[in-house]
Amino acid sequence: MSEESAQGKREWPELVFIKFSIAAAIIEKENPNVKAIKILAGTPRILNFDETRVWVDVNIQDKAVKTPRVG
């Protein structure tokens, strides 16, 4: 069993330029152990690593602008 399948998917490059609501649903479906968190790109954030969090950096059109990753 691969590490990804044991822990769920850990990054989603295919979601760049996708609206947050759609991206969050996909992230949480593909890895039920995480919660997608919306953050405006460039906004300061907590720097601790958290296996249950996926930051989704969005622009003012509410679209992901970076690859969402666990952490």
Image (spheres, rainbow, N blue to C red):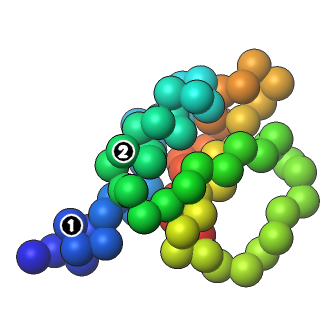
Q: Residue at x 33, y 49 (%)?
A: 30
Residue pointed to by mark 2: 29
Residue most extreme to the left: 1
Residue most extreme to the top: 61
Residue 17 visible in image:
no
Query: Mark 1: few, some, or many residues within 10 Å (few <14, many ≥20)?
Result: few
The CA distance from mark 2 to mark 1 is 13 Å
Q: Position of residue 51 (x, y in %)?
A: 52, 74
Residue pointed to by mark 1: 5
Q: In terms of image quadrants, where is residue 58?
A: top right
State if disc 1 and disc 2 touch (CB < 8 Å): no
Q: Residue at x 42, y 64 (%)?
A: 33
The relative height of residue 70 versus residue 66 in the rendered view (above or below) is: below
Q: Residue at x 49, y 61 (%)?
A: 34
Q: Position of residue 6 (x, y in %)?
A: 23, 74
The relative height of residue 41 versus residue 60 in the rendered view (above or below) is: below
Image quarter in which the N terminus is found: bottom left
